[in-house]
Amino acid sequence: MQQRLPSPELIHVAAAGENSGRVVLAARTGKPHAAAIAAAVTVARAFDASVEILLIECPDVLALTAHSFAREISYGGQIGALSAPSLAAGQSAERRIAEKTILDALKAAGVPSTLTTVRAGSLEAIAEACRAQGPWNIVCLADAVGIRDGEWLNGLLGTVGGTTGVVCVGPCAKSSTGDVVVVVEDVERLTPMLRAAERLAVALARSNGNVPVIRLLLAGSSRDHTGELDGFVRLALPEGRARGGVKLQIEARPLNHSTHAELAEASRRIAAGFVVARAGGVAMPVGTGGNDVIAVLSCPLLLVR
Amino acid sequence: MVFKWGQRGKSAGDGVAEAATGVASKWTQSLRAMSGRSTAGKSTALDPLPISELRRTVDPASLGFKTTADIAPIRGLIGQERALAAIAFGTDMTAMDYNIFVLGPPASGKRTALKTQLIEKAAARPLPDDWAYVYNFQEPSRPRALRLPPGRARALARVMIGAIDELRGIVPALIEGEDYQARRRGIDAGFQGVQDQALEALTQKAAAQNIAVLRTPQGFALAPMHEGKVVKPETFNALPDAMRTEKQAQIASFEVELAQILERLPKSEKERRGKVAELNGELARAVVTSALEDIATAFADIPAVIAHLNEAGEDLVRNIAIFLPGGEDEAVAIREPSDATRDPRFRRYMVNVMVGQTPQADGSLPQGAPVIEETNPVYGNLIGRIEHVTQGGALLTDFLLMKPGALHRANGGYLMVDARRLVQSPFAYEALKRALKAREIRIEPPQETAGIGIVPQTLDPEPMALDVKVIMTGEREAYYALAQGDPDFLGLFKVQADFDDAIPRSPENDRAYAGVIASIVEEHKLRPVDASGVARIIEEGARLADDREKISVEIGYVSDVVREADYWARKAGRTAIGHDDVEAAVRAQIQRADRIKDQAQETVERGVVLVDTDGAEVGQINGLAVMQVGNFAFGRPSRITARVAIGQGRIIDIEREAKLGGASHTKGMMILQGFIAGRFAQDMPLALSATLTFEQSYGGVDGDSASSTEIYALLSALADVPIDQGFAVTGSVNQRGDVQAIGGVNHKIEGFYDLCVARGLTGRQGVLVPKSNVQHLMLREDIVAAAAAGSFRLFGVGTIDEGIEILTGVQAGVRGADGTYPAESINGRAEARLRQYAERARAYGRSSGSPDGVVS
């Protein structure tokens, strides 16, 4: 199943020719994923951007302690009382851990950063940050995205303005400096996706010392559609060198949308460093079932609006 | 520096001096004139020794070659048949307690000869087995010792590395493969889907009933929700009771459901892990079996290897995940073509070859048993060691850090070790004995065996069976010290191979010596030595032996002389080393070492140390000592004086009273006393008080080689007859007055000769040596020349009476039929003096009221 989002009137940061943008690294929990932070670093380097760290505390949980019946179910399945002091202490500890983890990583990478802590709903907090700094923001999610986050992610892409894309990682992701895979499902967004991919490929190649490579994975909705995409892409983009010395490889690969893991498997096999895909497309978490790409993808995913 | 008046322990033998002929020499006449004594007691003194007795020369023509290039080199030992037979016996005895101790002088070439002989023996013995240590999968702290046929240990180590490398390539490839991944995804997706879907379903079900599932730091919490937002408490509390109660009940129900889902997660994860382990095990068994089956086939004849392979295989199957990328760093490590032997994950599958025969260039194995010489036999070098690496401040080890010692390398063959170094190395000797007794090599930290200190984490490896013949080399003192001090020693080293210091002189041995010189020339690529040079070296060998009838086998010294002579020959532009070059080398050696000798002589020449070389004095004589400085010895004259007075028959050794005399010297003095008493006190008490001393001697005196000299001084004092100071004397004496052999006779003569030369030879000077020492004379050529010119003389003396006649020019005197000595003879005069003392003492005793008339 695919979800097609309404095409926003937004010029992609790379397509707009801007040399710098802004990366919002949003952390909703105290457990930021190392690959997510590394991905934020790569994106920041690719777009010569600083990183605004946004630590989000959910106000609803604290408010919940005012209910006399409120209880906490631990990860081990134990049901216990929910006290405001212990909850506040737990949140504070989570925040400190997240803050230190992220700041240390960014400092080590030499990426400039600012840090803001907000107590608000996560969508509202990110929307506000993007509204203040937009329009060329890229939102990086510091927490691993699971299948239960599909709805929330759709909400983010649908409601948060001033962003050109969202970078997220799944629980299996690892930071990698391999090639950039661009999942081409239609020709409309090919150019902005390709421009973003070029920058990411250069940034990744700078880390591993290799020639930057972009692999175009043509994923039509059917064999015929894939054939059409193949013809168009080869006509428009001669295989070989793209801009900035980036090497371009085209692979026509009709994906079976009932097994999204095939994309993840293809990415793993070529040791992809980043996957760039259309928001609402094949790589988009759907929030149901167990077959999301993100759940098994071994590298970060940039969902371009 | 101590004077050494050493008594040579050798048998004196019969005199070799030619029969004395002729009349008393001119000097004796002069002496008589000087002393103003009557010639009534005419001396029958001996003639000086003939020139032929002073040095045994070698006629170059008798050697039968022109230069050493014409003869075959001899690399072994010469004239050491007894020692070599002992070594042959010891090496033939297979029993472990028949180890060999080779004793003999240093630098005698015994080590080289021993090694040569051992190598010959070893060549006929079988190549010993290989030994290796492998990981003990049952008891990791106790590495397993594997014994393999020769050449197989390294092969096993190689193929094990190959197998691990194969698995390092195959396992990740299989894991990456579509088949495995599909099956793995199936497992993961099944479990993950179940868990996540259950949570997702619960979340949606709760949302449908306006209940939000919120994440907390420790888990989840449920809250009433309205239009997607959590209802505030005040709003909720404003709701009707029934509605609130219902919502709370719903929330409680969802909480229980959520708790049940979460409770299932660990069990589910365990189950998932089990499924994955099953999958991995299935894959692992196939690839591990494939990787090891070739090894098992190749080593099917060695059950211990097969057993180890089985255990290693099971362990590999259990731990197949070590070949998988487990993290980012690990992933990099896996991809890099690193050495499997260095990767800590694979170390337990490696083989530590302790002893392994390496094939030669043609692929064949070397032949014969090993001959190992451990020049630094400290504990670790001998027994082997367990090394450690530091990790996080801790000392860690494993079986691959075990290093073999000399015992491992010599196992099945021979081990040579220097006794002194071995005994001086802490724990090493005891460890060697333990190994020989137990017939096994057990590597342990030395502090553990001694039960001292803190032992870091270590191993207790299985011992290796030991079959080795140990050959200890050392000086005689070391052998005797061990034999006396260690009760185990003689039980373990049952064979002693005793190398002589010197071999007899004979034409055959002279030629053999030339062969040894030829081997030195060949080994060091020197100029050939011509016959005159060889003759001179043989003479030097005899001098080194301190015996003209023998040649020293200190090959190290001979080698030094030959090499230094080559230097002088090169400087002189000669193509062969000749007599003069050898002479130059010997002189240069002496010159380099004789600073102390020069200093000592200078003190005498300048009158600081009083030693006369002319004139005559009563109760005063020149003795001779040998001083040893490093390996350089020289003779030094010293004045000995005697004073006599009435007393109680006591002869006072001033050296002993001043605690400057050694035991041997004291013994010599007591013998002297016995001689005097035996000769003169048969019919009267010995009312004598005599004092004897080495003048200006402060460093201590030992040895009895001056005992004859002291008797001469005492007789001179008693007889009141002066001793010619142009003489120096050496020789010990027995109670019967026989002069006995001493050591260092050549050095002693040369020391006095050099002093006389410095002061000017008078023609009357000379040295009295024991007749039994004449056979040891191997004097310098300049002394021989001086003797030939009549400027210096040597006398071989058999008795005190012979000696005193030469020294005083007065007849010693023989007791006649009436029981008395001739009145003017030395003995007659001495007896008269003693009788006079006795009568005076008796008279003094009577006058002083002593009942027995004895002076008290």
Image (cartoon, coloured by chain):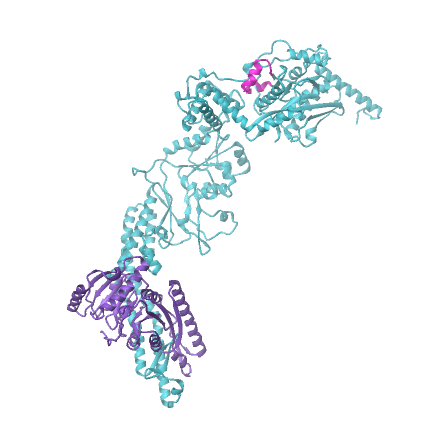
Chain colours: A purple, B cyan
Quarter of the rendering occupied by the N terminus of chain B: top right
The answer to whether residue B396 shows anywhere in this view is: yes
Q: Nearer the viewer, residue B496 or B622?
A: B622
Residue at the bottom extreme of this rendering: B240
Q: Nearer the viewer, residue A27 or B808?
A: A27
Q: Position of residue B37 (x, y in %)?
A: 72, 12
Is residue B533 rendered to the left or right of residue A42? right
Region rendered in magenta: B770-793
Q: Position of residue B212 (x, y in %)?
A: 34, 80
Quarter of the rendering occupied by the C terminus of chain B: top right
Q: Nearer the viewer, residue B593 or B92?
A: B593
**Which corner quadrant of the image does residue B842 belong to?**
top right
Number of dots carrying numbers: 0
Q: Position of residue A53 (x, y in %)?
A: 38, 71
Residue at image location 38% in from the left, 52% down from the top: B136
Q: Position of residue B282 (x, y in %)?
A: 28, 59
Quick check: is B781 in the magenta stretch? yes
Quick check: is A166 in the magenta stretch? no
Q: Nearer the viewer, residue B427 or A231?
A: A231
| Depicted B308 relative to depicted B205: above or below | above
| Depicted B44 relative to depicted B656: above or below | above
**Which corner quadrant of the image does residue B467 belong to?**
top left
